[in-house]
Amino acid sequence: MVYAAAILALIGFATGLWFRLRFLLAILALLLLLSIFFSISSGFGFLDTALTIMAAQTITQAGYFLGLVARAFFTANGVRHIL
């Protein structure tokens, strides 16, 4: 699970560096479906499924935020990026 969390964080970070908010929303929708499928196939209950979904979404969104911060830090030409 640690590797999965690291991969999710890297996906979020890369999305924050190169893409806009719409792409993140598409990734989060796909991640929601994958999390539900994983939870059902693992036999999780409702609470475990909800925690799995929230953890995956939170890790990805935190990575996205760090990617946005890195993009703003490395953008030195003064061009503003609108989400």
Image: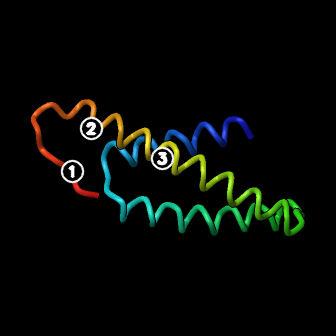
Q: Position of residue 76 (x, y in %)?
A: 15, 31
Residue lying at 73% horizontally and 67% vertically, measured from the top left: 37
65 horizontally vs 39: left or right: left
| Left or right: residue 29 compared with residue 16 | right
Assess whether mark 2 and mark 1 are in contact (beta carbons under 8 angstroms): yes
Of mark 2 and mark 3, the one earlier in the sequence is: 3
Crowding at mark 1 (Cα within 10 Å: few <14, some 14-19, many 20+): few
What residue sits right under mark 2 in the picture?
A: 72
Q: Earlier in the sequence, mark 3 or mark 1?
A: 3
Q: What's the amino acid at mark 2?
A: Ala
Residue at 71%, 35% in the rendered image: 2
Q: Quadrant of residue 14?
A: top left
Tell me the distance, in whole angstroms, between the alpha carbons under discs 1 and 2: 8 Å
Depth check: 67 or 27 in front?
A: 67
Q: Residue 18: x percent and y percent?
A: 30, 46
Residue 6 - label: none
Point out residue 57 in the picture as x, y percentages from the top left corner. 60, 56
Name which residue lies at 53% across and 62% down. 28
Which residue has dot 1 on it? 81
